[in-house]
Image (cartoon, rainbow, N blue to C red):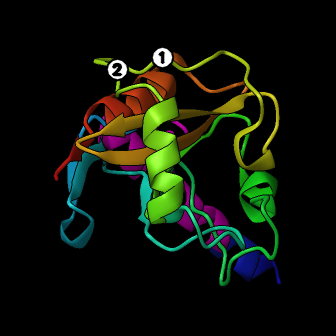
Amino acid sequence: MIRRLLLLFALVSVGCASTTALGGTISADEPSRASDRAVLAQARISFTYASNWHVRTTRLNGVLGPTTRFTVTSFPLRQPRPDADFCASTLNDQWPPTGAWVQLTEELDGASLKKLLRRIPPRPQRFRLAKSGAGGLCTGPVSGQLAFQERGRAFYLDYGVGASASPGTRRALLALIDSLRIGE
Protein backbone atom coordinates (compact mmCIF):
# COMPACT_ATOMS: atom_id res chain seq x y z
CA MET A 1 0.00 0.00 0.00
CA ILE A 2 2.78 2.43 0.94
CA ARG A 3 4.67 1.53 -2.26
CA ARG A 4 1.60 2.37 -4.34
CA LEU A 5 1.22 5.73 -2.61
CA LEU A 6 4.93 6.53 -3.15
CA LEU A 7 4.63 5.54 -6.83
CA LEU A 8 1.54 7.73 -7.22
CA PHE A 9 3.33 10.64 -5.52
CA ALA A 10 6.34 10.20 -7.84
CA LEU A 11 4.14 10.16 -10.95
CA VAL A 12 2.26 13.27 -9.85
CA SER A 13 5.58 15.04 -9.09
CA VAL A 14 6.95 14.18 -12.54
CA GLY A 15 3.71 15.39 -14.14
CA CYS A 16 3.90 18.70 -12.27
CA ALA A 17 7.57 19.15 -13.21
CA SER A 18 6.71 18.54 -16.87
CA THR A 19 3.94 21.12 -16.72
CA THR A 20 6.27 23.66 -15.14
CA ALA A 21 8.96 22.94 -17.73
CA LEU A 22 6.45 23.71 -20.47
CA GLY A 23 5.92 27.22 -19.20
CA GLY A 24 4.00 27.22 -15.95
CA THR A 25 0.63 26.13 -14.80
CA ILE A 26 -1.86 24.96 -17.39
CA SER A 27 -5.46 25.74 -16.51
CA ALA A 28 -8.29 23.80 -18.09
CA ASP A 29 -10.53 26.75 -17.25
CA GLU A 30 -8.76 29.14 -19.60
CA PRO A 31 -9.43 29.00 -23.34
CA SER A 32 -6.54 27.96 -25.54
CA ARG A 33 -4.87 30.67 -27.59
CA ALA A 34 -4.88 28.19 -30.47
CA SER A 35 -8.11 27.83 -32.38
CA ASP A 36 -9.82 25.33 -34.64
CA ARG A 37 -12.35 25.91 -37.41
CA ALA A 38 -15.52 23.81 -37.49
CA VAL A 39 -17.26 23.43 -40.85
CA LEU A 40 -20.77 22.01 -40.87
CA ALA A 41 -21.02 21.63 -44.64
CA GLN A 42 -24.54 20.22 -44.78
CA ALA A 43 -25.85 23.11 -42.63
CA ARG A 44 -23.68 25.66 -44.48
CA ILE A 45 -22.30 26.98 -41.17
CA SER A 46 -18.73 27.42 -39.95
CA PHE A 47 -17.11 28.98 -36.90
CA THR A 48 -13.80 29.24 -35.03
CA TYR A 49 -13.42 28.10 -31.42
CA ALA A 50 -10.70 27.69 -28.77
CA SER A 51 -9.01 24.37 -29.51
CA ASN A 52 -9.39 23.09 -25.93
CA TRP A 53 -13.18 23.57 -26.12
CA HIS A 54 -15.64 20.82 -27.10
CA VAL A 55 -17.97 20.73 -30.12
CA ARG A 56 -21.00 18.51 -30.60
CA THR A 57 -23.74 18.54 -33.22
CA THR A 58 -26.31 16.39 -31.43
CA ARG A 59 -29.21 17.93 -29.55
CA LEU A 60 -29.11 18.35 -25.78
CA ASN A 61 -32.83 18.28 -25.05
CA GLY A 62 -36.07 16.72 -26.27
CA VAL A 63 -36.88 19.57 -28.67
CA LEU A 64 -36.86 18.51 -32.33
CA GLY A 65 -37.53 21.96 -33.78
CA PRO A 66 -35.73 24.25 -34.04
CA THR A 67 -32.92 21.98 -35.21
CA THR A 68 -29.70 21.95 -33.20
CA ARG A 69 -26.78 22.91 -35.41
CA PHE A 70 -24.04 22.78 -32.76
CA THR A 71 -23.18 23.18 -29.10
CA VAL A 72 -19.71 24.25 -27.93
CA THR A 73 -18.66 24.00 -24.29
CA SER A 74 -15.48 25.09 -22.54
CA PHE A 75 -15.78 21.92 -20.45
CA PRO A 76 -16.29 18.26 -21.36
CA LEU A 77 -20.01 17.49 -21.52
CA ARG A 78 -20.93 13.88 -20.90
CA GLN A 79 -24.41 13.19 -22.21
CA PRO A 80 -25.16 9.85 -23.89
CA ARG A 81 -28.71 10.85 -24.92
CA PRO A 82 -30.79 14.05 -25.03
CA ASP A 83 -32.70 15.16 -21.96
CA ALA A 84 -36.40 14.36 -22.28
CA ASP A 85 -37.89 17.86 -22.00
CA PHE A 86 -37.24 21.42 -23.19
CA CYS A 87 -34.52 22.09 -20.61
CA ALA A 88 -30.90 21.04 -20.98
CA SER A 89 -30.63 19.66 -17.44
CA THR A 90 -27.45 17.67 -18.10
CA LEU A 91 -25.72 20.80 -19.43
CA ASN A 92 -26.86 22.76 -16.39
CA ASP A 93 -25.69 20.05 -13.97
CA GLN A 94 -22.21 19.77 -15.53
CA TRP A 95 -21.63 23.47 -16.25
CA PRO A 96 -18.88 24.71 -13.89
CA PRO A 97 -19.01 28.31 -12.60
CA THR A 98 -15.82 29.00 -14.58
CA GLY A 99 -17.19 27.55 -17.83
CA ALA A 100 -19.04 28.81 -20.87
CA TRP A 101 -21.22 27.29 -23.57
CA VAL A 102 -23.12 28.25 -26.70
CA GLN A 103 -25.75 26.46 -28.76
CA LEU A 104 -27.02 27.44 -32.20
CA THR A 105 -30.39 26.16 -33.40
CA GLU A 106 -32.13 26.89 -36.68
CA GLU A 107 -35.83 27.10 -37.47
CA LEU A 108 -36.50 24.90 -40.50
CA ASP A 109 -40.31 24.57 -40.31
CA GLY A 110 -41.73 26.63 -43.19
CA ALA A 111 -44.65 28.27 -41.35
CA SER A 112 -42.59 29.04 -38.24
CA LEU A 113 -39.73 30.32 -40.35
CA LYS A 114 -42.00 32.72 -42.24
CA LYS A 115 -43.35 34.16 -38.94
CA LEU A 116 -39.90 34.41 -37.37
CA LEU A 117 -38.36 36.22 -40.31
CA ARG A 118 -40.95 38.98 -39.87
CA ARG A 119 -40.30 39.31 -36.11
CA ILE A 120 -36.61 38.81 -35.38
CA PRO A 121 -33.83 41.27 -36.13
CA PRO A 122 -31.04 40.75 -38.62
CA ARG A 123 -27.75 39.45 -37.27
CA PRO A 124 -25.80 42.23 -35.56
CA GLN A 125 -22.27 43.06 -36.66
CA ARG A 126 -21.11 42.14 -33.15
CA PHE A 127 -23.09 40.13 -30.63
CA ARG A 128 -23.53 41.43 -27.08
CA LEU A 129 -24.10 39.03 -24.23
CA ALA A 130 -25.97 40.13 -21.13
CA LYS A 131 -24.09 39.81 -17.84
CA SER A 132 -27.20 38.12 -16.52
CA GLY A 133 -30.00 36.85 -18.66
CA ALA A 134 -33.25 34.97 -18.81
CA GLY A 135 -31.77 31.49 -18.56
CA GLY A 136 -31.29 30.03 -22.03
CA LEU A 137 -32.20 26.30 -22.10
CA CYS A 138 -33.33 26.62 -18.43
CA THR A 139 -29.73 26.98 -17.26
CA GLY A 140 -29.90 29.85 -14.84
CA PRO A 141 -29.32 33.56 -14.52
CA VAL A 142 -25.94 33.86 -16.27
CA SER A 143 -27.29 32.59 -19.56
CA GLY A 144 -29.60 33.86 -22.25
CA GLN A 145 -30.89 33.64 -25.79
CA LEU A 146 -30.48 35.81 -28.86
CA ALA A 147 -32.61 35.41 -31.97
CA PHE A 148 -31.43 36.66 -35.35
CA GLN A 149 -31.84 36.13 -39.05
CA GLU A 150 -29.30 35.97 -41.82
CA ARG A 151 -29.61 35.08 -45.51
CA GLY A 152 -33.29 34.18 -45.16
CA ARG A 153 -32.54 31.79 -42.28
CA ALA A 154 -33.71 32.16 -38.64
CA PHE A 155 -31.57 31.18 -35.64
CA TYR A 156 -31.62 31.03 -31.86
CA LEU A 157 -28.32 31.43 -30.08
CA ASP A 158 -28.44 30.17 -26.48
CA TYR A 159 -25.41 30.88 -24.32
CA GLY A 160 -24.07 30.79 -20.80
CA VAL A 161 -21.03 32.32 -19.13
CA GLY A 162 -20.39 31.08 -15.60
CA ALA A 163 -20.44 33.58 -12.74
CA SER A 164 -16.73 32.88 -12.07
CA ALA A 165 -15.65 32.68 -15.73
CA SER A 166 -12.54 34.65 -16.59
CA PRO A 167 -12.57 37.62 -18.94
CA GLY A 168 -10.62 35.40 -21.37
CA THR A 169 -13.42 32.83 -21.36
CA ARG A 170 -15.99 35.54 -22.07
CA ARG A 171 -13.83 36.93 -24.90
CA ALA A 172 -13.37 33.46 -26.38
CA LEU A 173 -17.13 32.86 -26.36
CA LEU A 174 -17.79 36.20 -28.06
CA ALA A 175 -15.05 35.50 -30.61
CA LEU A 176 -16.68 32.15 -31.40
CA ILE A 177 -20.11 33.74 -31.87
CA ASP A 178 -18.75 36.60 -33.97
CA SER A 179 -16.84 34.12 -36.15
CA LEU A 180 -20.06 32.42 -37.29
CA ARG A 181 -20.33 32.19 -41.07
CA ILE A 182 -23.75 31.31 -42.46
CA GLY A 183 -24.29 30.37 -46.10
CA GLU A 184 -27.47 30.51 -48.14
Q: Which residue is mark 1?
A: 128
Of helix, strand and loop, which one carries label 1? loop
Name the mark nearer the viewer: 2 or 1: 2
Using the numbered discs, state the Cα–Cα distance from disc 2 to disc 1 in whole angstroms.
9 Å
* Residue 86 locus on image (x, y percent): 78, 62
Question: Vertical placement of 81 versus 116: above or below?
Answer: below
Q: Is residue 3 magenta?
A: no
Question: Vertical placement of 134 versus 155: above or below?
Answer: above
In which image quadrant can residue 163 be found? top right
Q: Is residue 142 left or right of residue 72?
A: right
Q: Which residue is rendered at x = 40% and y = 39% of the image?
A: 20
**Residue 124 bears which disc, if any?**
2
Q: Is residue 179 left or right of residue 7?
A: left
Q: Which residue is rendered at x = 81% and y = 56% of the image?
A: 93
Q: Nearer the viewer, residue 70 or 152?
A: 152
- Asked if labels 1 and 2 touch by Cβ distance under 8 angstroms, the answer is yes
Q: Is residue 29 magenta?
A: yes
Residue type highlighted by circle 1: Arg
* Residue 79 locus on image (x, y percent): 66, 75
* Residue 180 locus on image (x, y percent): 27, 40
Q: Taking the image as drawn, is residue 17 in sight?
A: yes
The local crowd at label 1, few if under 14, some if 14 to 19, many if 20 or more residues have their Cα within 10 Å, is few
Q: Which residue is rendered at x = 79% and y = 58% of the image?
A: 87
Q: Which residue is rendered at x = 77% and y = 52% of the image?
A: 92
Residue extent of the magenta highlight = 8-30
